[in-house]
C-alpha cells in the first residue's frame, strides 16, 4: 500500500483501537490501513490518550516532514532575491513594476540561466507574486437601500436601421438585498442610454432603491476618485429627479460592486449566447423575458426564489417608480460673444450685455435652455432648432433693441409716434416687395426727426406726399435747405422771433366772428 497521510478521524480511530488493546495487525486489518502506517502513529502516541489534543499532537509529529532541499535554479534565484523584488515591486516613487517576462530577460543577461516556469514558481512561492489576496465578505445592505449597476459587452448583432454589425452592450442592474436583477440592451454607453435603462429597471422592479452604486463610466462620472468622484451634471440631474443617491466604485476595483460584476458573464452566457435578434427592440424584449423566467431562480447565496424574496421583504422599502420619462439634459460651457449671443447645439441664445466675454454653463433639454453663471440663473429661452435664434431685445443696451429686431412693423410704429405724415410717409416707403432694401431709409427718417424735430419733418413729409416724392435723402436735403434759409434770414435781421410773452398781444376774443349771443357780427 502506498504512503498517504491520515485524516484526523482516521488517526483518532487508530488511537481509540490501541487504547482498546488491539494489536497493530488487528488495527490494520479492521481499518484497512498499512501496518507500517499504523505503527508510526501508535509510536508517536506513546502513552497519550485519544483526546483531541493527543490526536493533534500525533498528527503533527508524524506528518511534519522536513522540506526538501531547494534545487540549484532556486538557489541561484535566491541569490538575486533583492534585485528581483525591486523589479517586480519597486519601492521608489514613480518607478513602474516590470513584467515577469522582462525580469526573465534581464536575468539571462546577467548570467542567471533558469527557465521561465521556474522563475514563475519561485516568484510565487518566495515573493507572493500574483498571489490571490484574501477577501472580506460584506454584509448585505438593508432592503431597498442599494442597487448595483454595471455595463457589460454581450457581443455583435446587426443594427436594423443602419444595416451594419454593431457591438451590443447591456446595462445590468442588481438589487443587493434580494438579488433581483434587470438587463437592458443598448448600442451606446451614453448618459441617455443609462437613464433610459435605469427607468426601465425601476418600472420592472416596481420601485426605486435609495442608492445606486455605479461604475466609473464617462456617461455617469467625469472625474473618477476613490474619495471625491465628480458625477456628470446630466446624471446628477437624473438622480435628483428620481430621488436617489449616487455612490461610485473605485477604478479597477470590481469587488466594490461584486453583486452585479459577476452577473455580467451570467447574463451573457445564459441570455445572449446562441440567440438571434432581429433588432435592438427584439433584444430588449428577449432580455426582459429572460429576467422574468431564468433570472428569477433560487439564488445560490440567499437560497430563496428571487422574485418571492423581493416581493416579501424588499418591495415595501422601495421608493415609488417613476411615472414619466426623464428628459435628459445636455450641460455645456459656452462663451458669450460681443453680439450678446452664445451658441448651443448650433442654435443662438441671447444674454444681457454685462455677461459679454464670460464663459457660462448652459443646461438644455427638449423644451428649455437655462443659462447659469456660477450658481445664478441669468437667462432662460425656449429651445431652438439648429440654425435658429432666440433673442430677447431687453438684453441689448437701451436704444439698441430696435436695431436688433429690424422689423418693418417696428419702424412704422416708431414713425407714427413722430407724426401723422411721418407715419404715412414711412408706410409708403416700406410698401414694396423687398422692404429690406429701404429699411435704412426708414431708420434715416427717424434720425431726421431727432435732428430737426418731429414737427418740421412731419411738415416736409406732408408736402412730399402731395407731390409723390418718396425719397428720404430728398427729405434730408429739403430740411437742410430750410434750416440754411432760416439761419441766413436770422443773420440778416429779416427773421425776428417774437418774445415768449408779447407786451401788446391782443386777446383771442378780439378775432372772434360770433357775437356774444351766438349770432354773426354785421
Image (cartoon, rainbow, N blue to C red):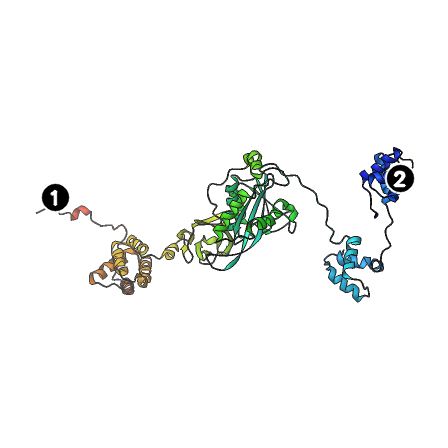
306 in relation to 486, above or below? above
What secondary structure is marked by label 1?
Answer: loop
Q: Which residue is mark 1?
A: 515
Tell me which label, 1 or 2, sits earlier in the chain.
2
Where residue 144 sits in the image (x, y, percent)?
A: 57, 37
Of residues 405 and 471, the one drawn nearer to the viewer in this rendering:
405
Labelled pair 1, 2 in contact (Cβ < 8 Å): no
Q: CA distance from mark 1 to mark 2?
A: 164 Å
Where residue 1 sits in the image (x, y, percent)?
A: 84, 47
What secondary structure is marked by label 2?
Answer: helix
Where residue 70 sits in the image (x, y, percent)?
A: 85, 56
Looking at the image, residue 133 sits to the left or right of residue 381; the answer is right
Looking at the image, residue 207 sits to the left or right of residue 136; the answer is left
Residue located at (10% from left, 43% from top) = 519
Residue count near mark 2 (Cα–Cα under 10 Å), binned few <14, some 14–19, many ≥20: some
Residue located at (24% from left, 58% from top) = 459
Of residues 342 and 424, the one drawn nearer to the viewer in this rendering:
342
Residue 22 can be seen, yes or no: yes
**Residue 24 disc label:** 2
Looking at the image, residue 107 sits to the left or right of residue 498; the answer is right
Label 1 vs label 2, nearer the camera: 2
Of residues 38 and 184, the one drawn nearer to the viewer in this rendering:
38
Where residue 125 sits in the image (x, y, percent)?
A: 79, 53
320 in relation to 498, above or below? above
Examine the image and state in which quarter residue 209 appears. top right
18 in relation to 436, above or below? above
Amino acid at each position: 500500500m502506498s504512503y498517504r497521510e491520515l485524516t484526523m478521524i482516521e488517526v483518532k480511530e487508530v488511537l481509540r483501537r490501541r487504547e482498546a488493546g488491539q494489536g497493530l495487525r488487528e488495527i490494520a486489518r479492521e481499518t484497512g490501513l498499512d501496518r507500517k502506517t499504523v505503527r508510526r502513529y501508535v509510536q508517536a502516541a506513546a502513552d497519550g490518550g485519544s483526546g483531541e489534543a493527543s490526536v493533534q499532537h500525533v498528527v503533527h509529529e508524524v506528518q511534519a516532514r522536513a522540506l526538501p532541499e531547494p534545487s540549484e535554479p532556486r538557489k541561484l534565484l535566491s541569490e538575486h532575491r533583492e534585485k528581483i523584488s525591486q523589479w517586480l515591486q519597486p519601492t521608489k516613487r514613480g518607478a513602474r513594476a516590470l513584467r515577469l517576462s522582462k525580469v526573465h530577460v534581464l536575468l539571462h543577461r546577467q548570467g542567471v540561466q533558469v527557465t521561465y516556469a521556474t522563475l514563475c514558481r519561485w516568484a510565487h512561492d518566495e515573493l507572493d507574486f500574483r498571489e490571490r489576496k484574501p477577501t472580506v465578505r460584506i454584509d448585505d445592505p438593508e432592503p431597498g437601500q442599494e442597487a448595483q449597476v454595471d455595463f457589460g459587452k454581450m457581443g455583435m448583432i446587426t443594427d436594423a436601421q443602419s444595416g451594419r454589425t454593431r457591438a451590443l452592450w447591456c446595462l445590468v442592474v442588481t438589487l443587493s438585498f434580494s438579488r433581483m436583477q434587470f438587463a437592458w440592451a443598448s448600442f451606446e454607453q451614453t448618459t441617455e442610454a443609462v437613464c433610459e435603462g435605469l427607468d426601465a429597471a425601476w418600472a420592472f422592479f416596481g420601485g426605486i432603491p435609495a442608492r445606486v452604486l455605479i461604475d466609473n463610466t464617462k456617461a455617469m462620472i467625469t472625474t473618477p476618485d476613490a474619495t471625491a468622484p465628480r458625477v456628470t451634471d446630466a446624471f446628477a440631474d437624473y438622480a435628483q429627479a428620481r430621488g436617489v443617491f449616487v455612490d461610485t466604485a473605485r477604478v479597477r476595483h470590481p469587488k466594490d460592486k461584486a453583486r452585479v460584476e459577476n452577473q455580467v458573464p451570467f447574463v451573457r452566457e445564459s441570455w445572449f449566447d446562441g440567440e438571434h435578434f432581429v433588432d435592438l427592440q427584439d433584444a430588449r424584449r428577449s432580455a426582459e423575458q429572460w429576467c422574468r423566467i431564468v433570472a428569477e431562480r433560487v439564488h445560490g447565496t440567499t437560497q430563496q426564489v428571487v422574485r418571492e424574496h423581493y416581493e416579501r421583504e424588499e418591495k415595501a422599502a422601495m421608493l415609488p417608480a417613476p411615472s414619466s420619462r426623464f428628459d435628459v439634459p445636455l450641460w455645456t460651457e459656452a462663451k458669450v460673444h460681443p453680439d450678446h449671443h452664445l451658441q448651443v447645439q448650433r442654435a443662438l441664445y441671447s444674454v444681457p450685455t454685462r455677461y459679454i466675454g464670460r464663459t457660462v454653463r448652459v443646461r438644455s433639454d427638449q423644451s428649455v435652455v437655462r443659462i447659469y453663471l456660477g450658481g445664478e440663473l441669468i437667462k432662460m429661452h425656449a429651445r431652438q432648432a439648429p440654425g435658429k435664434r432666440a433673442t430677447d431685445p431687453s438684453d441689448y443696451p437701451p436704444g439698441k433693441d430696435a436695431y436688433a429686431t429690424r422689423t418693418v412693423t417696428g419702424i412704422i410704429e416708431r414713425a407714427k409716434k413722430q407724426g401723422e405724415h411721418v407715419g404715412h410717409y414711412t408706410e409708403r416707403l416700406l410698401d414694396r416687395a423687398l422692404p429690406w432694401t429701404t429699411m435704412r431709409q426708414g431708420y434715416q427718417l427717424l434720425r431726421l426727426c431727432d435732428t430737426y424735430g418731429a414737427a418740421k419733418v412731419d411738415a416736409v413729409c406732408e408736402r412730399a406726399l402731395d407731390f409723390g416724392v418718396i425719397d428720404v435723402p430728398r427729405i434730408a436735403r429739403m430740411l437742410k435747405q430750410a434750416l440754411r434759409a432760416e439761419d441766413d434770414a436770422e443773420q440778416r435781421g429779416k427773421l425776428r422771433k417774437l418774445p415768449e410773452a408779447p407786451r401788446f398781444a391782443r386777446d383771442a376774443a378780439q378775432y372772434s366772428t360770433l357775437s356774444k349771443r351766438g349770432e354773426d357780427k354785421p
